[in-house]
Image (tube, grey):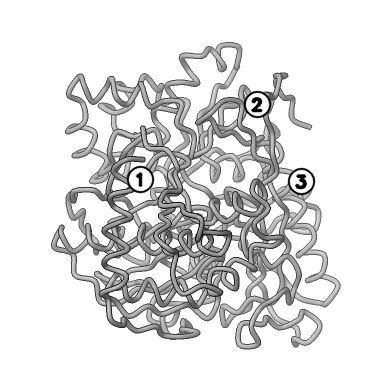
Protein backbone atom coordinates (compact mmCIF):
# COMPACT_ATOMS: atom_id res chain seq x y z
CA UNK A 1 0.00 0.00 0.00
CA UNK A 2 1.10 3.57 -0.61
CA UNK A 3 1.59 5.90 2.30
CA UNK A 4 -0.33 9.12 1.73
CA UNK A 5 -0.08 12.53 3.32
CA UNK A 6 -3.00 13.82 5.37
CA UNK A 7 -4.86 16.99 4.47
CA UNK A 8 -8.17 18.69 4.94
CA UNK A 9 -10.23 18.61 1.74
CA UNK A 10 -12.21 21.79 1.39
CA UNK A 11 -14.09 20.56 -1.63
CA UNK A 12 -14.24 17.28 -3.50
CA UNK A 13 -16.45 16.16 -6.32
CA UNK A 14 -16.77 13.21 -8.62
CA UNK A 15 -16.57 13.99 -12.33
CA UNK A 16 -17.91 11.43 -14.75
CA UNK A 17 -16.42 11.02 -18.18
CA UNK A 18 -18.81 12.47 -20.75
CA UNK A 19 -20.29 10.05 -23.25
CA UNK A 20 -18.38 7.14 -21.64
CA UNK A 21 -19.32 3.60 -22.64
CA UNK A 22 -18.66 1.61 -19.50
CA UNK A 23 -19.81 -1.79 -20.73
CA UNK A 24 -18.75 -3.93 -23.60
CA UNK A 25 -21.55 -2.75 -25.86
CA UNK A 26 -22.71 0.46 -24.17
CA UNK A 27 -24.59 2.83 -26.44
CA UNK A 28 -22.33 2.36 -29.43
CA UNK A 29 -23.75 2.59 -32.91
CA UNK A 30 -23.96 -0.78 -34.68
CA UNK A 31 -21.00 0.12 -36.91
CA UNK A 32 -18.90 0.84 -33.82
CA UNK A 33 -20.01 -2.11 -31.71
CA UNK A 34 -17.03 -4.21 -30.59
CA UNK A 35 -16.88 -7.93 -30.85
CA UNK A 36 -17.41 -9.91 -27.67
CA UNK A 37 -14.53 -11.93 -26.32
CA UNK A 38 -16.47 -15.16 -26.54
CA UNK A 39 -17.37 -14.57 -30.21
CA UNK A 40 -13.72 -14.50 -31.24
CA UNK A 41 -11.55 -17.41 -32.12
CA UNK A 42 -8.48 -17.71 -29.93
CA UNK A 43 -6.47 -14.57 -30.63
CA UNK A 44 -3.62 -12.51 -29.27
CA UNK A 45 -4.74 -9.28 -27.62
CA UNK A 46 -3.02 -5.96 -26.99
CA UNK A 47 -4.17 -3.99 -23.95
CA UNK A 48 -4.17 -0.20 -23.82
CA UNK A 49 -4.19 1.40 -20.38
CA UNK A 50 -5.67 4.89 -20.80
CA UNK A 51 -5.27 6.99 -17.64
CA UNK A 52 -7.30 10.08 -18.45
CA UNK A 53 -8.35 13.15 -16.51
CA UNK A 54 -11.78 11.97 -15.43
CA UNK A 55 -11.27 8.23 -15.42
CA UNK A 56 -9.06 5.23 -16.15
CA UNK A 57 -9.89 2.58 -18.70
CA UNK A 58 -8.29 -0.52 -20.13
CA UNK A 59 -9.22 -1.44 -23.70
CA UNK A 60 -8.39 -4.73 -25.43
CA UNK A 61 -7.63 -4.71 -29.16
CA UNK A 62 -7.18 -7.56 -31.63
CA UNK A 63 -4.64 -7.67 -34.46
CA UNK A 64 -7.00 -5.68 -36.71
CA UNK A 65 -6.93 -2.85 -34.12
CA UNK A 66 -10.58 -3.48 -33.25
CA UNK A 67 -11.95 -2.99 -29.73
CA UNK A 68 -12.97 -6.33 -28.23
CA UNK A 69 -13.36 -5.49 -24.55
CA UNK A 70 -13.00 -2.61 -22.10
CA UNK A 71 -13.27 -1.63 -18.45
CA UNK A 72 -13.67 1.87 -17.04
CA UNK A 73 -13.52 3.48 -13.60
CA UNK A 74 -14.22 7.10 -12.69
CA UNK A 75 -11.51 9.16 -11.00
CA UNK A 76 -12.15 11.52 -8.07
CA UNK A 77 -11.45 15.20 -8.67
CA UNK A 78 -10.26 17.46 -5.83
CA UNK A 79 -10.62 21.25 -5.81
CA UNK A 80 -8.94 22.55 -2.61
CA UNK A 81 -9.19 26.19 -3.75
CA UNK A 82 -10.54 28.02 -6.79
CA UNK A 83 -8.26 27.26 -9.73
CA UNK A 84 -6.61 24.31 -8.00
CA UNK A 85 -7.23 20.81 -9.39
CA UNK A 86 -5.70 17.68 -7.85
CA UNK A 87 -5.79 13.91 -8.21
CA UNK A 88 -4.81 11.15 -5.80
CA UNK A 89 -2.06 9.30 -7.67
CA UNK A 90 -2.64 6.20 -5.54
CA UNK A 91 -6.23 6.12 -6.81
CA UNK A 92 -4.98 6.35 -10.40
CA UNK A 93 -2.72 3.35 -9.74
CA UNK A 94 -5.54 1.41 -8.07
CA UNK A 95 -7.92 2.07 -10.97
CA UNK A 96 -5.25 1.09 -13.47
CA UNK A 97 -4.75 -2.23 -11.70
CA UNK A 98 -8.50 -2.83 -11.35
CA UNK A 99 -9.27 -2.25 -15.04
CA UNK A 100 -6.25 -4.23 -16.22
CA UNK A 101 -7.21 -7.17 -14.01
CA UNK A 102 -10.83 -7.11 -15.16
CA UNK A 103 -10.01 -7.17 -18.88
CA UNK A 104 -7.12 -9.61 -18.46
CA UNK A 105 -9.30 -12.00 -16.45
CA UNK A 106 -12.00 -12.07 -19.12
CA UNK A 107 -9.39 -12.56 -21.82
CA UNK A 108 -7.82 -15.48 -19.98
CA UNK A 109 -11.19 -17.09 -19.29
CA UNK A 110 -11.99 -16.90 -23.01
CA UNK A 111 -8.67 -18.53 -23.86
CA UNK A 112 -6.99 -15.43 -25.34
CA UNK A 113 -3.39 -14.39 -24.84
CA UNK A 114 -2.32 -10.86 -23.92
CA UNK A 115 0.94 -10.18 -25.73
CA UNK A 116 1.74 -6.62 -24.68
CA UNK A 117 0.43 -3.49 -22.96
CA UNK A 118 0.58 0.13 -24.10
CA UNK A 119 0.11 3.11 -21.80
CA UNK A 120 -1.40 6.50 -22.58
CA UNK A 121 -2.10 9.22 -20.07
CA UNK A 122 -3.11 12.75 -19.19
CA UNK A 123 0.13 14.51 -19.90
CA UNK A 124 1.24 17.50 -17.82
CA UNK A 125 -0.21 16.29 -14.50
CA UNK A 126 2.66 16.07 -12.01
CA UNK A 127 3.26 13.49 -9.27
CA UNK A 128 5.69 13.99 -6.37
CA UNK A 129 6.74 10.82 -4.54
CA UNK A 130 9.57 8.90 -2.91
CA UNK A 131 10.78 5.98 -5.04
CA UNK A 132 12.33 4.33 -2.01
CA UNK A 133 9.16 4.05 0.07
CA UNK A 134 6.35 4.76 -2.40
CA UNK A 135 5.17 7.63 -0.18
CA UNK A 136 3.23 10.26 -2.09
CA UNK A 137 4.47 13.68 -1.05
CA UNK A 138 1.44 15.60 -2.30
CA UNK A 139 -1.62 15.06 -4.40
CA UNK A 140 -0.88 15.18 -8.11
CA UNK A 141 -1.22 18.66 -9.62
CA UNK A 142 -3.50 18.25 -12.64
CA UNK A 143 -2.80 19.90 -15.99
CA UNK A 144 -5.88 22.09 -15.43
CA UNK A 145 -4.43 23.46 -12.17
CA UNK A 146 -3.70 27.22 -12.33
CA UNK A 147 -2.00 27.82 -8.97
CA UNK A 148 1.35 28.57 -10.63
CA UNK A 149 0.11 31.45 -12.78
CA UNK A 150 2.13 33.95 -10.73
CA UNK A 151 5.33 31.92 -11.24
CA UNK A 152 4.81 31.96 -15.00
CA UNK A 153 3.98 35.66 -15.01
CA UNK A 154 7.11 36.45 -13.00
CA UNK A 155 9.33 34.45 -15.36
CA UNK A 156 7.71 36.16 -18.34
CA UNK A 157 8.32 39.58 -16.80
CA UNK A 158 11.97 38.62 -16.25
CA UNK A 159 12.31 37.93 -19.98
CA UNK A 160 12.55 34.12 -19.89
CA UNK A 161 9.60 33.53 -22.23
CA UNK A 162 11.59 33.57 -25.46
CA UNK A 163 14.17 31.05 -24.16
CA UNK A 164 11.41 28.75 -22.95
CA UNK A 165 9.65 29.02 -26.31
CA UNK A 166 12.74 28.37 -28.43
CA UNK A 167 13.99 25.49 -26.28
CA UNK A 168 10.79 23.62 -25.52
CA UNK A 169 8.26 24.82 -28.12
CA UNK A 170 5.87 25.73 -25.29
CA UNK A 171 4.60 28.95 -23.75
CA UNK A 172 5.05 30.01 -20.14
CA UNK A 173 1.74 28.80 -18.78
CA UNK A 174 0.64 26.87 -15.66
CA UNK A 175 -0.68 24.16 -18.01
CA UNK A 176 2.76 22.60 -18.31
CA UNK A 177 4.63 20.63 -15.65
CA UNK A 178 7.73 22.70 -14.88
CA UNK A 179 6.02 25.39 -12.83
CA UNK A 180 4.06 22.68 -10.98
CA UNK A 181 7.34 20.97 -10.13
CA UNK A 182 8.80 24.25 -8.90
CA UNK A 183 5.75 24.82 -6.71
CA UNK A 184 6.05 21.34 -5.20
CA UNK A 185 9.74 21.85 -4.49
CA UNK A 186 9.17 25.30 -3.01
CA UNK A 187 6.40 23.91 -0.80
CA UNK A 188 8.86 21.50 0.83
CA UNK A 189 6.73 18.49 -0.08
CA UNK A 190 9.77 16.40 -1.03
CA UNK A 191 12.17 17.50 1.72
CA UNK A 192 11.96 14.21 3.64
CA UNK A 193 12.09 11.89 0.63
CA UNK A 194 15.03 9.51 0.33
CA UNK A 195 14.66 9.18 -3.45
CA UNK A 196 12.64 12.30 -4.35
CA UNK A 197 10.86 12.04 -7.69
CA UNK A 198 8.88 14.40 -9.91
CA UNK A 199 7.08 12.63 -12.71
CA UNK A 200 4.24 12.66 -15.18
CA UNK A 201 1.52 10.01 -15.03
CA UNK A 202 3.17 7.68 -17.56
CA UNK A 203 6.25 7.43 -15.36
CA UNK A 204 4.18 6.92 -12.21
CA UNK A 205 2.22 4.06 -13.79
CA UNK A 206 5.31 2.39 -15.29
CA UNK A 207 7.03 2.52 -11.90
CA UNK A 208 3.97 1.21 -10.07
CA UNK A 209 3.07 -1.61 -12.49
CA UNK A 210 6.65 -2.87 -12.71
CA UNK A 211 6.95 -3.28 -8.95
CA UNK A 212 7.01 0.20 -7.41
CA UNK A 213 9.44 0.45 -4.51
CA UNK A 214 10.32 -3.20 -5.12
CA UNK A 215 12.29 -2.73 -8.34
CA UNK A 216 9.95 -0.55 -10.40
CA UNK A 217 11.48 1.14 -13.45
CA UNK A 218 11.64 4.94 -13.59
CA UNK A 219 11.29 5.99 -17.23
CA UNK A 220 9.43 8.34 -19.54
CA UNK A 221 9.38 9.06 -23.28
CA UNK A 222 9.47 12.19 -25.48
CA UNK A 223 5.76 12.83 -26.10
CA UNK A 224 5.27 13.20 -22.34
CA UNK A 225 8.66 14.72 -21.55
CA UNK A 226 8.07 17.42 -24.17
CA UNK A 227 5.04 18.59 -22.13
CA UNK A 228 7.02 19.29 -18.97
CA UNK A 229 8.71 22.46 -20.30
CA UNK A 230 12.01 20.85 -19.31
CA UNK A 231 12.92 18.91 -22.49
CA UNK A 232 14.93 20.29 -25.40
CA UNK A 233 12.94 19.73 -28.60
CA UNK A 234 16.06 19.24 -30.67
CA UNK A 235 18.00 16.82 -28.47
CA UNK A 236 14.98 14.98 -26.99
CA UNK A 237 16.74 15.12 -23.62
CA UNK A 238 16.35 17.20 -20.49
CA UNK A 239 17.53 20.77 -20.97
CA UNK A 240 20.07 21.97 -18.42
CA UNK A 241 18.90 25.56 -19.04
CA UNK A 242 15.27 24.71 -18.29
CA UNK A 243 15.96 22.53 -15.25
CA UNK A 244 18.16 25.32 -13.86
CA UNK A 245 15.51 27.97 -14.55
CA UNK A 246 12.81 26.05 -12.68
CA UNK A 247 15.16 24.64 -10.04
CA UNK A 248 14.38 21.00 -10.81
CA UNK A 249 17.29 18.62 -10.03
CA UNK A 250 17.98 16.22 -12.90
CA UNK A 251 18.16 13.23 -10.58
CA UNK A 252 14.48 13.73 -9.72
CA UNK A 253 13.46 13.21 -13.35
CA UNK A 254 13.00 9.92 -15.19
CA UNK A 255 15.30 8.80 -17.99
CA UNK A 256 13.85 9.36 -21.47
CA UNK A 257 13.46 6.40 -23.85
CA UNK A 258 11.83 6.14 -27.31
CA UNK A 259 8.04 5.80 -27.32
CA UNK A 260 8.40 2.25 -28.65
CA UNK A 261 10.74 0.19 -26.54
CA UNK A 262 10.65 -2.51 -23.88
CA UNK A 263 9.95 -0.22 -20.95
CA UNK A 264 9.23 -2.88 -18.34
CA UNK A 265 7.41 -6.09 -17.59
CA UNK A 266 4.36 -6.04 -15.37
CA UNK A 267 4.96 -7.42 -11.90
CA UNK A 268 2.90 -10.48 -10.97
CA UNK A 269 2.70 -9.04 -7.46
CA UNK A 270 0.85 -6.00 -8.85
CA UNK A 271 -1.28 -7.53 -11.61
CA UNK A 272 -1.21 -11.33 -11.19
CA UNK A 273 -3.10 -11.93 -14.45
CA UNK A 274 -0.44 -10.03 -16.44
CA UNK A 275 2.76 -10.97 -14.63
CA UNK A 276 5.66 -10.91 -17.09
CA UNK A 277 3.69 -9.22 -19.90
CA UNK A 278 5.80 -6.41 -21.41
CA UNK A 279 4.92 -2.75 -21.69
CA UNK A 280 6.27 -1.80 -25.13
CA UNK A 281 4.64 1.51 -25.99
CA UNK A 282 3.91 4.76 -24.17
CA UNK A 283 2.43 7.99 -25.53
CA UNK A 284 0.79 11.05 -24.04
CA UNK A 285 -2.94 10.96 -24.68
CA UNK A 286 -3.16 13.56 -27.45
CA UNK A 287 -0.18 12.15 -29.32
CA UNK A 288 -1.69 8.70 -28.89
CA UNK A 289 -4.90 9.95 -30.51
CA UNK A 290 -2.84 11.37 -33.40
CA UNK A 291 -1.22 7.95 -33.80
CA UNK A 292 -4.52 6.12 -33.37
CA UNK A 293 -6.08 8.27 -36.09
CA UNK A 294 -3.25 7.20 -38.44
CA UNK A 295 -2.09 10.79 -38.92
CA UNK A 296 1.30 9.64 -40.15
CA UNK A 297 1.81 12.22 -42.92
CA UNK A 298 2.82 15.83 -42.46
CA UNK A 299 -0.23 18.12 -42.41
CA UNK A 300 -2.80 15.50 -41.34
CA UNK A 301 -4.76 16.85 -38.36
CA UNK A 302 -6.84 15.30 -35.61
CA UNK A 303 -9.23 16.83 -33.09
CA UNK A 304 -10.02 15.06 -29.82
CA UNK A 305 -13.08 16.22 -27.89
CA UNK A 306 -12.50 14.90 -24.39
CA UNK A 307 -12.25 16.72 -21.06
CA UNK A 308 -10.63 19.45 -23.16
CA UNK A 309 -10.35 19.83 -26.93
CA UNK A 310 -6.98 19.25 -28.56
CA UNK A 311 -5.89 19.78 -32.16
CA UNK A 312 -2.63 18.22 -33.35
CA UNK A 313 -1.11 18.38 -36.81
CA UNK A 314 1.70 16.04 -37.86
CA UNK A 315 4.66 18.35 -38.56
CA UNK A 316 7.16 15.83 -39.93
CA UNK A 317 10.52 14.62 -38.67
CA UNK A 318 12.24 17.93 -37.98
CA UNK A 319 11.24 20.54 -35.44
CA UNK A 320 9.11 23.09 -37.32
CA UNK A 321 9.76 26.02 -35.02
CA UNK A 322 7.00 27.85 -33.18
CA UNK A 323 3.76 29.45 -34.33
CA UNK A 324 1.75 32.27 -32.71
CA UNK A 325 -0.94 30.95 -30.38
CA UNK A 326 0.14 27.31 -30.73
CA UNK A 327 2.77 25.04 -29.22
CA UNK A 328 5.24 22.64 -30.80
CA UNK A 329 5.64 19.23 -29.26
CA UNK A 330 7.00 15.75 -29.94
CA UNK A 331 4.39 13.46 -31.49
CA UNK A 332 6.37 10.25 -30.99
CA UNK A 333 9.80 8.69 -31.23
CA UNK A 334 9.51 5.24 -32.80
CA UNK A 335 13.14 4.37 -32.22
CA UNK A 336 14.23 1.75 -34.74
CA UNK A 337 11.18 2.48 -36.91
CA UNK A 338 12.38 5.95 -37.90
CA UNK A 339 13.20 9.46 -36.71
CA UNK A 340 11.16 11.31 -34.13
CA UNK A 341 8.00 12.99 -35.41
CA UNK A 342 6.88 16.44 -34.29
CA UNK A 343 3.44 18.00 -33.99
CA UNK A 344 1.95 21.47 -33.75
CA UNK A 345 -0.82 21.66 -31.17
CA UNK A 346 -3.68 23.81 -30.01
CA UNK A 347 -5.30 23.13 -26.64
CA UNK A 348 -8.66 24.19 -25.22
CA UNK A 349 -8.72 23.39 -21.51
CA UNK A 350 -12.46 22.69 -21.24
CA UNK A 351 -14.76 20.78 -23.60
CA UNK A 352 -16.45 17.71 -22.15
CA UNK A 353 -15.80 19.13 -18.67
CA UNK A 354 -18.37 21.84 -19.46
CA UNK A 355 -20.89 19.12 -20.36
CA UNK A 356 -20.22 17.56 -16.96
CA UNK A 357 -20.81 20.95 -15.34
CA UNK A 358 -24.21 21.35 -17.01
CA UNK A 359 -25.11 17.86 -15.87
CA UNK A 360 -23.69 17.72 -12.35
CA UNK A 361 -23.90 21.33 -11.16
CA UNK A 362 -26.93 22.71 -12.99
CA UNK A 363 -28.96 19.51 -13.56
CA UNK A 364 -29.66 20.47 -17.18
CA UNK A 365 -29.36 16.85 -18.22
CA UNK A 366 -29.28 13.49 -16.48
CA UNK A 367 -26.68 11.88 -18.76
CA UNK A 368 -24.12 13.51 -21.02
CA UNK A 369 -25.58 11.82 -24.08
CA UNK A 370 -28.78 13.90 -23.68
CA UNK A 371 -26.97 17.13 -24.55
CA UNK A 372 -27.30 16.85 -28.33
CA UNK A 373 -31.05 16.24 -28.26
CA UNK A 374 -31.57 19.23 -25.97
CA UNK A 375 -29.35 21.50 -28.07
CA UNK A 376 -31.00 20.33 -31.32
CA UNK A 377 -34.49 21.10 -30.03
CA UNK A 378 -34.03 24.81 -30.83
CA UNK A 379 -32.92 26.44 -34.12
CA UNK A 380 -30.31 28.71 -32.50
CA UNK A 381 -28.97 29.87 -29.15
CA UNK A 382 -31.12 33.03 -29.10
CA UNK A 383 -28.02 35.18 -28.69
CA UNK A 384 -26.59 33.23 -25.76
CA UNK A 385 -22.79 32.86 -25.75
CA UNK A 386 -21.03 30.25 -23.58
CA UNK A 387 -17.34 30.76 -22.81
CA UNK A 388 -16.11 27.57 -21.05
CA UNK A 389 -13.03 29.22 -19.52
CA UNK A 390 -13.27 27.36 -16.21
CA UNK A 391 -9.48 27.05 -16.11
CA UNK A 392 -8.53 30.05 -18.21
CA UNK A 393 -8.37 30.12 -21.99
CA UNK A 394 -5.82 28.01 -23.85
CA UNK A 395 -4.81 28.25 -27.51
CA UNK A 396 -4.62 30.64 -29.21
CA UNK A 397 -5.54 33.10 -26.43
CA UNK A 398 -3.33 31.87 -23.55
CA UNK A 399 -5.16 33.84 -20.87
CA UNK A 400 -4.77 32.51 -17.34
CA UNK A 401 -7.01 35.32 -16.04
CA UNK A 402 -10.09 34.36 -18.08
CA UNK A 403 -13.20 33.03 -16.34
CA UNK A 404 -16.14 31.05 -17.66
CA UNK A 405 -19.23 33.01 -18.61
CA UNK A 406 -22.70 32.71 -20.11
CA UNK A 407 -23.82 35.98 -21.70
CA UNK A 408 -26.65 37.24 -23.88
CA UNK A 409 -29.37 35.86 -21.61
CA UNK A 410 -32.96 36.96 -22.13
CA UNK A 411 -36.42 35.77 -21.14
CA UNK A 412 -36.46 33.79 -24.36
CA UNK A 413 -33.40 31.78 -23.35
CA UNK A 414 -33.78 28.50 -21.49
CA UNK A 415 -31.98 25.23 -20.98
CA UNK A 416 -32.06 24.34 -24.67
CA UNK A 417 -30.52 27.64 -25.78
CA UNK A 418 -27.74 27.37 -23.18
CA UNK A 419 -27.08 23.76 -24.21
CA UNK A 420 -26.88 24.81 -27.85
CA UNK A 421 -24.55 27.70 -26.95
CA UNK A 422 -22.22 25.18 -25.32
CA UNK A 423 -22.16 22.89 -28.37
CA UNK A 424 -21.48 25.92 -30.56
CA UNK A 425 -18.69 27.02 -28.18
CA UNK A 426 -16.98 23.63 -28.54
CA UNK A 427 -16.88 24.19 -32.30
CA UNK A 428 -15.77 27.82 -31.90
CA UNK A 429 -12.84 26.83 -29.67
CA UNK A 430 -11.56 24.44 -32.29
CA UNK A 431 -12.18 27.01 -35.05
CA UNK A 432 -9.98 29.50 -33.17
CA UNK A 433 -7.21 26.92 -33.24
CA UNK A 434 -7.62 25.87 -36.87
CA UNK A 435 -7.52 29.55 -37.84
CA UNK A 436 -4.27 29.91 -35.87
CA UNK A 437 -2.87 26.97 -37.85
CA UNK A 438 -3.74 28.70 -41.11
CA UNK A 439 -2.38 32.04 -39.88
CA UNK A 440 0.88 30.25 -39.17
CA UNK A 441 1.05 28.93 -42.72
CA UNK A 442 0.13 25.35 -41.83
CA UNK A 443 -2.05 23.85 -44.53
CA UNK A 444 -4.92 21.75 -43.21
CA UNK A 445 -6.38 19.12 -45.54
CA UNK A 446 -8.99 17.44 -43.33
CA UNK A 447 -9.86 17.05 -39.67
CA UNK A 448 -10.07 13.57 -38.14
CA UNK A 449 -12.28 13.67 -35.06
CA UNK A 450 -12.48 11.41 -32.01
CA UNK A 451 -13.36 11.53 -28.33
CA UNK A 452 -16.68 11.24 -26.53
CA UNK A 453 -18.25 14.50 -27.73
CA UNK A 454 -17.42 13.62 -31.35
CA UNK A 455 -20.41 11.29 -31.21
CA UNK A 456 -22.61 14.40 -31.64
CA UNK A 457 -23.51 14.85 -35.32
CA UNK A 458 -24.51 18.43 -34.56
CA UNK A 459 -21.04 19.27 -33.25
CA UNK A 460 -19.29 17.59 -36.16
CA UNK A 461 -21.38 19.51 -38.71
CA UNK A 462 -20.81 22.80 -36.88
CA UNK A 463 -17.09 22.05 -36.83
CA UNK A 464 -16.91 21.37 -40.55
CA UNK A 465 -18.69 24.63 -41.35
CA UNK A 466 -16.77 26.71 -38.82
CA UNK A 467 -13.33 25.40 -39.75
CA UNK A 468 -14.01 25.13 -43.50
CA UNK A 469 -12.73 21.58 -43.43
CA UNK A 470 -14.00 18.12 -44.20
CA UNK A 471 -14.44 16.43 -40.82
CA UNK A 472 -13.97 12.66 -40.75
CA UNK A 473 -15.23 11.06 -37.58
CA UNK A 474 -13.25 7.97 -36.67
CA UNK A 475 -15.18 4.71 -36.72
CA UNK A 476 -13.66 4.04 -33.30
CA UNK A 477 -13.91 6.99 -30.93
CA UNK A 478 -11.31 5.23 -28.75
CA UNK A 479 -8.49 6.76 -30.79
CA UNK A 480 -6.35 7.47 -27.73
CA UNK A 481 -6.42 3.87 -26.52
CA UNK A 482 -6.01 2.65 -30.10
CA UNK A 483 -2.85 4.74 -30.43
CA UNK A 484 -1.37 3.25 -27.26
CA UNK A 485 -2.21 -0.27 -28.40
CA UNK A 486 -0.88 0.10 -31.93
CA UNK A 487 2.36 1.78 -30.90
CA UNK A 488 2.95 -1.07 -28.42
CA UNK A 489 2.02 -3.70 -31.00
CA UNK A 490 4.38 -2.14 -33.53
CA UNK A 491 7.31 -2.69 -31.20
CA UNK A 492 6.70 -6.46 -30.85
CA UNK A 493 5.78 -7.13 -34.48
CA UNK A 494 1.98 -7.38 -34.34
CA UNK A 495 2.15 -4.76 -37.09
CA UNK A 496 5.22 -4.10 -39.18
CA UNK A 497 4.81 -0.59 -40.59
CA UNK A 498 2.88 2.65 -40.39
CA UNK A 499 1.49 1.90 -43.83
CA UNK A 500 -0.09 -1.28 -42.50
CA UNK A 501 -1.63 0.62 -39.59
CA UNK A 502 -2.88 3.33 -41.91
CA UNK A 503 -4.85 0.75 -43.91
CA UNK A 504 -6.69 -0.29 -40.73
CA UNK A 505 -8.07 3.20 -40.04
CA UNK A 506 -11.48 4.08 -41.42
CA UNK A 507 -14.00 6.87 -40.84
CA UNK A 508 -17.53 6.43 -39.56
CA UNK A 509 -18.92 9.48 -41.35
CA UNK A 510 -17.77 12.51 -43.31
CA UNK A 511 -19.15 16.00 -42.60
CA UNK A 512 -18.76 18.73 -45.23
CA UNK A 513 -18.88 22.52 -44.72
CA UNK A 514 -22.16 24.31 -45.44
CA UNK A 515 -23.04 28.01 -45.77
CA UNK A 516 -20.93 29.75 -43.09
CA UNK A 517 -22.85 33.03 -42.78
CA UNK A 518 -24.75 32.13 -39.60
CA UNK A 519 -21.82 30.48 -37.84
CA UNK A 520 -19.50 33.37 -38.78
CA UNK A 521 -21.79 35.84 -37.02
CA UNK A 522 -22.01 33.58 -34.00
CA UNK A 523 -18.24 33.14 -33.91
CA UNK A 524 -17.61 36.87 -33.91
CA UNK A 525 -20.08 37.28 -31.03
CA UNK A 526 -18.32 34.47 -29.17
CA UNK A 527 -14.91 36.14 -29.65
CA UNK A 528 -16.34 39.34 -28.16
CA UNK A 529 -17.60 37.35 -25.19
CA UNK A 530 -14.15 35.76 -24.78
CA UNK A 531 -12.53 39.21 -24.70
CA UNK A 532 -14.59 40.05 -21.61
CA UNK A 533 -14.30 36.66 -19.89
**Which residue is drawn at the image coordinates 23% and 26% (left, top)?**
156
Corner quadrant of residue 30:
bottom right
Q: Please tell me whether mark 3 sits on a helix, a strand or a loop.
A: loop
Front label number (3 vs 1): 1
Under circle 2, the secondary element is loop
Q: Nearer the viewer, mark 2 or mark 1?
A: 1
Q: Where is residue 476 shown, x and y percent of the image?
A: 55, 76
Residue 396 versus residue 246 in the image, above or below: below
On residue 270, the disc is 3
Residue 395 pos. (x, y %):
31, 49
Query: Horizontal and vertical percent for residue 143?
Result: 48, 40
Which residue is painted at 48% across and 39% down in the image?
Answer: 144
Q: State the quadrant of the C terminus.
A: top left
Check disc 2: other Cα within 10 Å, few if <14, some if 14-19, many if 20+: many
**Between disc 3 and disc 1, whose residue precedes?**
3
Residue appearing at x 40%, y 39% in the figure: 392
Residue under numbered circle 2: 136
Quarter containing the N terminus: top right
Q: Which residue is mark 1?
A: 394
Q: Nearer the viewer, mark 3 or mark 2?
A: 2
Query: How many angstroms separate mark 2 from mark 1 (CA)?
Result: 29 Å
Label 3 vs 2, first from the N-terminus: 2
What is the C-alpha distance between the residues marked 3 and 2? 18 Å
Q: Secondary structure at mark 1?
A: loop
Q: Position of residue 376 (x, y in %)?
A: 53, 74
Q: Residue furthest right?
A: 109
Amino acid sequence: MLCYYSTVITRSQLFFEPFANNSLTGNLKPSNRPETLTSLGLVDLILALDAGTTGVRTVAFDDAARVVDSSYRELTQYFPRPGWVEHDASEIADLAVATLREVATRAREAGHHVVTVGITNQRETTVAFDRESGHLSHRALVWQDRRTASICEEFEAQGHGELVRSTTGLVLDPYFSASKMKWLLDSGALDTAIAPSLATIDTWLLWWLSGGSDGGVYLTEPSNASRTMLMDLDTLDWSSAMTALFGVPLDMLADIRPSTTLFATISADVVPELGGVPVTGVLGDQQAALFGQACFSSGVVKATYGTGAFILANAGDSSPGVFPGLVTTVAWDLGAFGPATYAVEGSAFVAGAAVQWLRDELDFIVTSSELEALASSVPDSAGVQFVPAFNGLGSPFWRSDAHGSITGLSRGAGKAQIARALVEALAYQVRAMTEAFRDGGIELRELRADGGAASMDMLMQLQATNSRLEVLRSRSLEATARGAATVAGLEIGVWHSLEQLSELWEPDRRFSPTDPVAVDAGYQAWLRACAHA
